[in-house]
Amino acid sequence: MSKVRALVLERQHELALRDIDLPLEVGPGMVKIAIHTVGVCGSDVHYYTHGKIGPFVVNDPMVLGHEAAGTVVEVGEGVTHLKVGDRVCMEPGIPDPNSRASRLGMYNVDPAVTFWATPPVHGVLTSEVVHPANYTFKLPDNVSFAEGAMVEPFAVGMQAATKARITPGDTAVVLGAGPIGTMVALAALAGGCARVIVADLAQPKLDIAAKYQGIIPVNIREKDIVAEVDRLTDGWGADVVFECSGSPHAWKTIMSLPRPGGVIVAVGLPVDPVPVDIASASTKELRIENVFRYAHQYDRAIALIASGKVDLKPLISETFDFEDSVKAFDRAVEARPSDVKLQIRVAK
Amino acid sequence: MSKVRALVLERQHELALRDIDLPLEVGPGMVKIAIHTVGVCGSDVHYYTHGKIGPFVVNDPMVLGHEAAGTVVEVGEGVTHLKVGDRVCMEPGIPDPNSRASRLGMYNVDPAVTFWATPPVHGVLTSEVVHPANYTFKLPDNVSFAEGAMVEPFAVGMQAATKARITPGDTAVVLGAGPIGTMVALAALAGGCARVIVADLAQPKLDIAAKYQGIIPVNIREKDIVAEVDRLTDGWGADVVFECSGSPHAWKTIMSLPRPGGVIVAVGLPVDPVPVDIASASTKELRIENVFRYAHQYDRAIALIASGKVDLKPLISETFDFEDSVKAFDRAVEARPSDVKLQIRVAK
Amino acid sequence: MSKVRALVLERQHELALRDIDLPLEVGPGMVKIAIHTVGVCGSDVHYYTHGKIGPFVVNDPMVLGHEAAGTVVEVGEGVTHLKVGDRVCMEPGIPDPNSRASRLGMYNVDPAVTFWATPPVHGVLTSEVVHPANYTFKLPDNVSFAEGAMVEPFAVGMQAATKARITPGDTAVVLGAGPIGTMVALAALAGGCARVIVADLAQPKLDIAAKYQGIIPVNIREKDIVAEVDRLTDGWGADVVFECSGSPHAWKTIMSLPRPGGVIVAVGLPVDPVPVDIASASTKELRIENVFRYAHQYDRAIALIASGKVDLKPLISETFDFEDSVKAFDRAVEARPSDVKLQIRVAK
Amino acid sequence: MSKVRALVLERQHELALRDIDLPLEVGPGMVKIAIHTVGVCGSDVHYYTHGKIGPFVVNDPMVLGHEAAGTVVEVGEGVTHLKVGDRVCMEPGIPDPNSRASRLGMYNVDPAVTFWATPPVHGVLTSEVVHPANYTFKLPDNVSFAEGAMVEPFAVGMQAATKARITPGDTAVVLGAGPIGTMVALAALAGGCARVIVADLAQPKLDIAAKYQGIIPVNIREKDIVAEVDRLTDGWGADVVFECSGSPHAWKTIMSLPRPGGVIVAVGLPVDPVPVDIASASTKELRIENVFRYAHQYDRAIALIASGKVDLKPLISETFDFEDSVKAFDRAVEARPSDVKLQIRVAK
């Protein structure tokens, strides 16, 4: 165990930037990373404000943060693709490589996954972390630490875009322009869509999304999304609909959005079961895909950022110093509609 | 117009075997078929008992029946793959070949489809019918008219099995052992499943299904289906779950049945929206497929019957003479649990 | 029949801009289009220089040209999605909608397809043409006629990108930087690839391709493509390899380019069978896809151009007046490495 | 190291049943299995007759055999799904679970795989072996050891059938009725095909295959396979063609066998590159799949055998006692056309 400084959620509503003991031995196949930048995720904020997410309850002090980039400072035995000094970002979930799901290539649905900042596992809003090299990805020179720390939420969008099985030139709809909806929209565009119609109630969120070529914003306070999709697709419907709002309300009309033979990808997670109109889904023979985090997306996400096809920098609303971490979280609690992503720079 | 004898639904609750005028001119690309055998479908019975199905209302007298086999008696201009004397069965739905859906190969979801015995389109419980040759399929010598008239309901099972994208050796669950559930189970077995676990409340239905090798019956009055699937799959879950009951109740526990990365195929159509647990579907990254009738399944269904892989004969519970058509419908209304399919032999 | 001015290939080596009788009646489901711009395709040039392509021999005078855009001037009965004045581009191949391949959604492999400027079918280097409305596509206001006439060759690239089943963030290799190779590279980028490595011997072609973000040019006179792909993919290999050179030589080393589980899409057509190393393809479990023209790509191609994701304008090397059509063809025969696409403006 | 009795290939042409030192410590995640039955594979025989296969050369004495079933006699730490006394069969290839290919779910194309009886790795024609529990599969009570030892070659057929992505009711062609061709044919039938047309020159092999319902034998000494497939599919072609002969000759006409949009699965491995007619493959937009051993097929193969859908027992031509192992190999060298699989019973 080593004593390191970290942002600790002591219990619901109580954050402290203080020293804590964390294990930092570098075993075989592991690397030690000096953390540079960490993004603030809605789940971190939710643990702060509610002390739990579903069955995951914060019973003991827990370090927050799971969207991280940094620099390799030590390399364990048998690691060949990374060396000291490499700038990297990390997948926060570590599966059992020998589980049945992992062996089938679906490590994200392995029930044995441990995930940063999910009780009782500590997160990485701290100076250093030890992580499996296989889940640590080198950043190209033209990808900054700040962008590296955006790979995690973007990977969620990539997983959704991948599950959709986009055909080049598709038209997509994204319901919900929060951080995840926006990530999904960018991944859908990078992943082959010609146009992405983004629907939300909050104009500031739509304004940010609308700066990207190919995104068509629809403020559903002003316009009916079904009518708009109908108009924009000559009555045919969208090829893909990404449900990113998590709102039961969205499910009431969602079947009117896709074309015959189209797909709905459920990204937002409603707390309770939602009413789904199977009869309407049947008439169009819709496919409904569900996603859980991501698998095999980090290298792809980094490649799209490095090639210039995806620019996540405009989504970083503000960067806080590590010493101001609690301020960053309190700002996140405000949920300003013009904030997409807040980041904390851990490195000096 | 020609005057022919037919089973006419005059209005709700009133059937008559009487003469009616039907168009029997054989245009280009069409064939005339002397009807031999017609199966009684749940939808035929529902029009009889309720006078409507959803938006489709019987306002005028309508000939019933859409599961038919017969003999070609006249061939229109340009038809090359059929000749007089060919024994055939027919798809009851005729799409617009130039619609967008048809051109994409999904003619079943073409909104312009006309379908036998769906108001205001007449069915085929009559002596002769004229039909597009492209939707008329030759029966091999070893496939009887009775089996030919079973192709239509079996095609529904084939569509479900196709949408599931079965991997050879899959384990499937079928919820609901009615005629469609049984057809789905047989199509799933023929389509690559090693085992199909069929769940129902009615023991006589399960007994019929259980006669087929590879089907494992589970009476859900006696056993918990989730526990049974868990036991039979060593805690992993089923690769494919076919929901054929149409019961909202089934959707409450369905997410516990598939394995991580598995698929649910919704075949049964609940009248109202059903509660779907998206969060549980997400954890396993399930795919949910919806089916609507069938497309491109007739030749495949016939090939499986002809090769001996699928034996539908045990599902024909009783055959009525044409003169006893009303009796056949009244028997169908009884809904005896041991009845799978009743047929009417139109030919003498 | 109507007498119209057209570029006629009288026989091998002999072109004439002269009057010719063409059928211009507008039947049901058809539209008449005033041609505006026509691209010169390698196949047009090949008929000019060789008088035939494989089994297709020019025995009678034939109008050339099949990459066309124009304006609707007359609309046949039953056409609802087009009106007089609409700016459009057209698919040159017309299938039999009732053929087995067409009904399955693969109209491009229907042997009954008739294709513009493929003997004995006339092309469209003329003032007007009558065409099925279903194969005529409206151009958005921000897509020019010149771009509209590029949709045909771009659709070939789209078909290849679609068959590849690109996963977002893939790395592709394109062998051959001719017009088709370049179209494939752009479609692959628009269709989800992060990077496309384009290999050719001709530096001017690579220079044109390299202007697009995401394209990495490799001059195979100077560098070994296998070593380059290895270096750029950290020894893993490319996700997709598009063979667009049609050279038997390319097939000798192609198996070294894809990653395990990767795909090769054969776009270039070698005249004779090529040696394929099945044993190496097996070791990596490669998938090899073949493409033939395109199906269902025009609307998708237009959507990508309209949204700004694909810019084909830099590929139009020079535009000729209709009166200079023969000059355009003689320039095409030169095959300047800096020429990608030559176009002829038919409209005044 | 423990001294055990084994069938050792001392060098090319020289087999000995003798004692040899093998490592039999049971580490974590491992199980020790008492071998019961081992099948003789063509590769075992090839090492015997040629001393090598491609780059794999027998430089040191090596135990042969990799198609094995037996009984668990010891269970290592952490193994939960197996216990002493379980009857099992084993995958002979062990990948690195942390390789890139393994993590993607394609462990069979992991270059780090070690495979029984592939120099310098010993095989299992011996009394006991220690193996990873994850690659050891429990046999149901109704699956014999002899059938268990057939799972390995059948898994090759399963991999081919899986890669084909069979649609229920497909018609397949298998070129070559050797052991692998026959396994592929049975897997294709179990995996959803209605009919499998099997082509070979050797009538005894065809006679064995023809005993299975759904297999149509074609002796290509007597009949033209292209004409036969044409006749049996009404001129449309086969949905899937499995090339299992490994003969360059087969590749000359193979493009005439599939339907438009069909698939060729290359199972047989020609020593040298074969001439492939890309132009013909293009006209039909064929997909060509390549397979390498198998991944994730053992549990599926066992499920199909246990459910009664696949009966491999008729393919076991003769069983030898362990003491007669050399005789078994000498009989295999004879390559009698009526021999499909020879097995050796190691257990007393």
Image: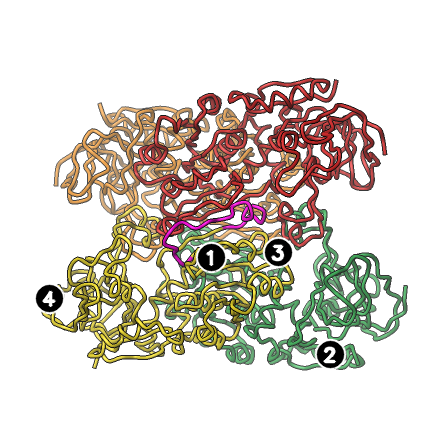
Chain colours: A orange, B green, C red, D yellow
Q: Which residue is mark 4?
A: D21
The stretch of residues the image draws in magenta is D267-287
Chain letter belonging to callout 1: D
Q: Nearer the viewer, residue B137 or B342?
A: B137
Q: CA distance from mark 3 to mark 2?
A: 29 Å
Q: Position of residue D202 (x, y in %)?
A: 45, 71
Q: Secondary structure at mark 2?
A: helix
Is there one chain holding both mark 2 and mark 4?
no
Query: Mark 2 packing: few (<14 Cα in 10 Å), some, or many (20+)?
Result: many
Front: mark 3 or 1: 1
Q: Which residue is mark 1?
A: D249
> In this rendering, would B119 be left or right of B103?
right
Q: Which residue is mark 3?
A: A279
Chain letter belonging to callout 4: D
Q: Secondary structure at mark 4?
A: strand
Is there one chain holding both mark 3 and mark 1?
no
Q: Are marks 2 and 1 in contact (CB under 8 Å)?
A: no
Q: Secondary structure at mark 1?
A: helix
If the image is split into quadrants, where does the N terminus of chain D sit? bottom left
Q: Which residue is mark 2?
A: B328
Q: Position of residue A66 (x, y in %)?
A: 30, 38
User: Which amino acid is tagged 2?
Assistant: Ala
User: Which amino acid is tagged 3?
Assistant: Ala
Does residue B174 appear in the picture of this structure? no
If the image is split into quadrants, where does the C terminus of chain D sit? bottom left
> In this rendering, would B102 be left or right of D99?
right
Looking at the rendering, which quadrant does residue C343 occupy? top right
Front: mark 2 or 1: 1
